[in-house]
Amino acid sequence: MATPEERIEKIDTAKILLAELAEIKASSLARTEELSRDINFSEAVPSFEEMIDIIKQLHQRSIDRLALNQITKIINVCNNLKNLIEKVRGFTLNQNTPADICQGIIQEVKNAYDGIMDPLTVPLAFTATLATDYAKIEREAKGYHATMKEEATAFKKLLESQKIEAEKALQAVKDQAAEAGVATNAQIFLTDSGSHAETAKKWLIATIASAIVTLIVAVSFVFISFMYKPETTAAAIQYVVSKLILLSTLSFGIFWCARNYKSSKHNETLNKHRANALMTFRAFVEGSGDNRIKEAILLQAAQAAFVNRPTGYESQEKEQQAINPVVEILGKSLVKSAGSS
């Protein structure tokens, strides 16, 4: 077993050799300018680059914790590689068969890779683990995990906000569509109300004209009755019957025109009421936050649009309400209360 002083001395020797070899450039060992174009070591440069690269990797790492036999292997490897480099640098053309000697050195360099790499495998692997900062990797991994978690949370919040905005936009579109539908239906009822108003005016004129004609005829008959004296009873009967038929026909005309006038006014008023109910529907809905009340308002609006209402123009009118909204609300409340309990 080596003493600590011997171990330190060996480590220093190995570091010096590694530093010395790491400074050498493999391209400088070709010696193409010093020798000749045909005899040089350019073929050995790739092999030198591979072996010197291994030395450089080991030089950049700490070898203080290696075992003594591994330190000794590093020293031997460095000396072997250094001897090859010295052979290349010490080669001259002033000798017998320089080309054969140059090729022999080149072949020796090419065959030296395994002898260099095999003893350094364990030191390279061990120093690689020492060079790896696992604590730093763990910190970075935790940092990336925290960052990804924050980004995932932010993305989730963004999705939720986008979902809420999308739901609001969809609800706004539905509300606009509902408003457009309500406004369209209200306009239909208004148009129909205007049409019935024009018809009612015509029937009113016809009623007044019929009444005037009937009044004129009746007054004329009164004046004629004072001047005309029937000669026989049959003539008197014929005279009275003819006047009654004429007056009855004129009276029926007045009744018919007046009835059509009342029907037209009834339809005008009813359609105007329906249009007003639909146009004020949105105001009542937006003023309430309870869905059950909104449903009751919707029922009332539907009844206003489809159920007949008394207007005062029709005789024997009776308001008929198909659905009682109060009963409807109470029924839904009782069902929800029973479900929750």
Image: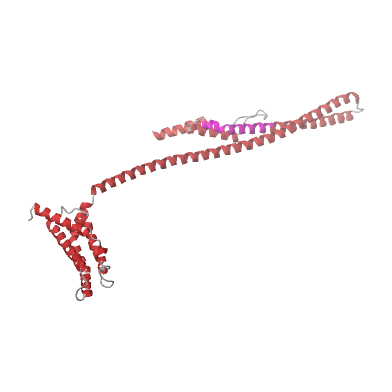
In the rendered image, which quarter is residue 304 located in?
A: top right
Is residue 292 on the magenta stretch?
A: no
Residue with the most extreme bottom position: 97
Q: Give residue 178's position: percent from left, percent from top.
A: 55, 38
Task: Name the residue nearer the viewer: 1 or 247.
Answer: 1
Residue 149 in sight in this render: yes
In the rendered image, which quarter is residue 87 located in?
A: bottom left
Task: Name the residue nearer the viewer: 164 or 226.
Answer: 164
Is residue 283 on the magenta stretch?
A: yes
Task: Name the residue nearer the viewer: 257 or 150.
Answer: 150
In which quadrant of the rendered image does the N terminus lie?
bottom left
Residue 114 in sight in this render: no
In this rendering, is residue 203 above or below 77? above
Residue with the most extreme front position: 94
- Residue at (41, 41) in percent of width and height: 158
Residue with the most extreme right position: 231
- Residue at (50, 39) in percent of width and height: 171
Residue with the most extreme top position: 226
Task: Name the residue nearer the viewer: 244 or 67.
Answer: 67
Q: Secondary structure of the magenta portion, mostly?
A: helix
Q: Give residue 306's position: percent from left, percent from top.
A: 60, 36
| Relative side of 88 to 314, left or right | left
Q: Give residue 202's position: percent from left, percent from top.
A: 74, 33
| Relative side of 200 to 112, left or right | right
Q: Give residue 264's position: percent from left, percent from top.
A: 69, 33
Which residue range is magenta in the image?
265-286
